[in-house]
Amino acid sequence: MPPRPLALVVMVGAIASLVAGLLAYRGQVEGLPELQLSGTADAARAIVAEVGSIAPFQDALAADYRLIAGYTTFLVLVLVVGWQCFAGPSARRAAGGLAGIAVVAGLLDVGENLAVDRGLLGLAAVPDQNAWWVVAAAADTLKLVLLVPTAGAAIVTLLLIGGRMLRPPGRSSLCRVVPGSVVTGEPRGYLPDVVRVEGDRPARRPGVCVSGGGIRSACVTLGALQVLRANGRLTDAGYLFSVSGGGYMTGALRLAMQRPGTGNGARALSPDAYSESTPELAYMHAHGDYIAQGAVQWVRALGVVLAHLLYALFLLASLAVGVGLLLGLFYREFRIAGPGLAHAFDLRSPLGGDPLPTDHSPGATWTIGALLVLTVLLWLIAGAVEGLTGEPHPRWRGAAWVVAGLTLLVAVVTMLVPALVELVIWRPDVAKLTGSVGVIGSVLTTLKTLGSKASSGAPSGRSLAKATQYVWPVVVVIVVALIVFGMLLGMAATLDAVVQSRGDRPLLLYGLAAGVVVAGVAAKFFDQTSASLHPFYRRRLNSLYSRREGPDAVPYGYDERTKLSTYATSVDGYPRFVFVATAHVKEPGVATRPVPYTFSSNWVGGAHVGYVPTEALIDNSPPCYRGDLTLLGAVAISGAAFASAMGVVSKPFEVLLALSNARLGAWLPNPVRLGQDAAVAGGWTRRRLPRVRSESYHAREVFGSHPVDDPLLLITDGGHYDNLGLVEALRHRCETVVVVDSSNDTPPYPTTLIDAMTLADTELGVTIDLDDPDALAPGSVLADGDLPQPWESLLPRFSSSAVVTGTIHYPAGPLGPAWDGTLVVVKARLTLDLPYEVLAYAASNPDFPYDSTADQWFDAAQFDAYHRLGRRLGKVAVERLTGLGVPVSHSAA
């Protein structure tokens, strides 16, 4: 990392070199760029004839050498500073490589000028000497194509490094970070170990896990926790791990225990929060359709979705228009259209004369042909060398791939972009139809993705899902392709407007430029998480699950900051609350993968990325993050099921959710990066924690970019890693684990439990032996003649048991020798011992108890059925724990 003053001197010198070159070239004849690209002696002769002499062009060539020296020096110096200052290895390699490309472009420019000079001297020769003009045009085409990405990267580097250079000196992070396995490289199962992170909570404590599943899981969780609490199985001796819908209810319980006007948790008043006949439970019972109640709220909810979609489309359109404006200026100055496409740009002399005597720029043809020949030659050399030596030679093949990529880039600039412009000019109906279909398709598929009660609750829901599982990805691909193609057409239309403008449409161009500026300001300074559905989702959860205990069940205000470090603290008689979410990370050489990210009153983070003390993280985070570092924020993030990255439940519509802005989840501080910043005392070149989560993070979601050392991580639903929270309970080395599983995995197998066991074995080395898991399978009850007649239709859906037990085998490690624990899993299943009213509901609702998680509109009957099912599961869990001889904790109320 170079010293700040040295980097500043180099940057200033680079800018001075560019300014000197531009001043030296100013005032030269305007036709030199067209002369360099003319490609034939006839075209060059026509351009020279309009000026009347070759002398002005020779003077311009002499000045152009100074311009070449100025812009090459500028590009190389700026990119070298980036190579030295960027933190990421990929960014450093890119900056270094582009600095080399800048040198190549400068040399091509020198060679092109030499060829033009020789061509000018040979214009009077007979026959015409076209060779020099072909060489000049080919060299100029390749140079221009190389300068497009190089100049763009240099400008970005100048802005980024310049901004970091001018900001005040940084300070070392005040957050104490316990590093995770990403940093230490040690086994993920043991770091950071429980003793270090939870010093006051050693291993071998009891743990209760409540699964994800939306409001279905919340209802089941409520019933199960009521019974566990009443029987002394939910105490302050252990942990309560919640995921997604299970977190709805645990968050509601904790918020109900907070005394009004205080910042401290207090023991629940009598009777316990959300017990039978309490006002808060009555309110929840009557408002299960919390997402939207009545026509007004439905209209408002749809309006929110469409508003966010329109905002996303505005940004996409502005991006297309902005690129079109820049390319329009480029193509207006440099006419490098390929064969048969020159009329798209109306190739005329810049001096106002007749059309140029050529139908295209020959430089494109010769450049693409030469690069193709070079690509084939490099592949042949690579094959020959490998055949002679018997060893692979990646350098030769790498060189071939680089030249092939350069060939593609030249083809895009000289062929594809002009072809799009021609399509807009000659087939405007196609362009309009494509854009309209893309927008309408994005609206419809976004609404379909978010789901509705009508489709998710219907008896045919599962068969319909199976029928569309192959069609749905195709539809998404088509819609995304149409959106992208529509953006390209919009870019081409803007490009054409700029190229063809002759001063007669200034208001249009200025208006487009102003729109692009507005979009750019919004993208930079508007918090993109606030532009997603996350705030709406959090507000709707707040409306139902944040009520204070008392006669009026007073709601929490949406703007009330329920700080994790205060509102998630342990309450006398209750376990420690841990909300389980998922972070998405991309390590070098490994595909993007989900890892755990948890929220508690003491720590935020996970075993892979590390942990940060909650209070310190809140105090050191900019204001835009603090709303998500609350108990309500943790509940909403842990339940962010529809996201642009969905981990183990990845879906084909993820990219559409990102493009349309119909996404949940939030970007939060990365403990890996906080730890690195603390280690280097916040070096001046490093990216700091952004004060605003700009649209660059939205773009990361679209392209699936989640580098593990980025300042922020995308945090989504805990079910994207483990929908039970079981793996986190095993990571904490709980001695007895009770799992309330209300996930709606497809029978007959408890796939969510199986996936969690596999993950625990892979990541922790913890294995589990289940006792008679087949009893959970629907249809495992055999009719013996005693089944009441009304329930005979339910026989294929009955399971012989709703509970399965197992032995947890913890391996030896830093926490001590190997030892065994006890697992009790109660699963949402239909059993013969369920209350009569639950069985009656099941008989008339074939999807019960597997209603889709997308169904977030529960009526009173649905709420009651799942709540009573949860109470029965809690009773079964208590009976099995008692039968296994698991003692009740001494701290039970």
Image (spheres, rainbow, N blue to C red):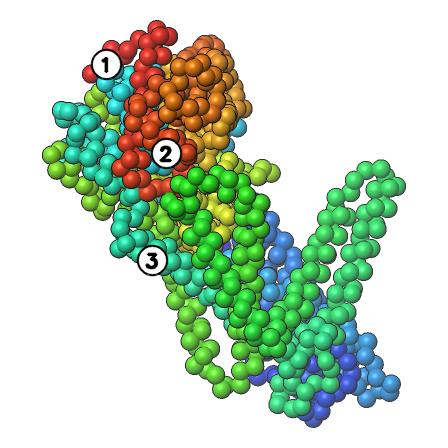
- For badge 2, the amino acid type reads Ser
Quick check: can you spot residue 39? Answer: yes
Q: Is 615 placed above or below 227 here? A: below
Counting from the top left corner in percent of width and height, residue 135 is at: 77, 72
Q: Which residue appears at 32% of the width and 49% of the height? A: 536
Q: Residues within 10 Å of mark 1 (few under 14, many from 20)?
A: some
For the residue pair 89 and 410, the one nearer the viewer reads as: 410
For the residue pair 810 and 845, the one nearer the viewer reads as: 845
- What whole-number distance in Å separates the C-alpha atoms at marks 2 and 1? 43 Å
Q: Are marks 2 and 1 in contact (CB under 8 Å)?
A: no
Residue 844: which numbered mark, if any? Answer: 2
Q: Are marks 3 and 1 in contact (CB under 8 Å)?
A: no
- For badge 3, the amino acid type reads Gly
Q: Is 568 placed above or below 141 here? A: above
Q: Which residue is mark 3?
A: 303
Quick check: can you spot residue 224? Answer: no
Q: Are marks 2 and 3 in contact (CB under 8 Å)?
A: no
Q: Which residue appears at 60% of the width and 49% of the height? A: 93
Residue 122: which numbered mark, if any? Answer: none
- N-terminal-most mark, 2 or 1: 2
Counting from the top left corner in percent of width and height, residue 680 is at: 44, 39
Residue placed furthest toward the top:
885
Q: Which residue is mark 1?
A: 891
Q: Secondary structure at mark 1?
A: loop
- Disc nearest the viewer among 2 and 1: 2
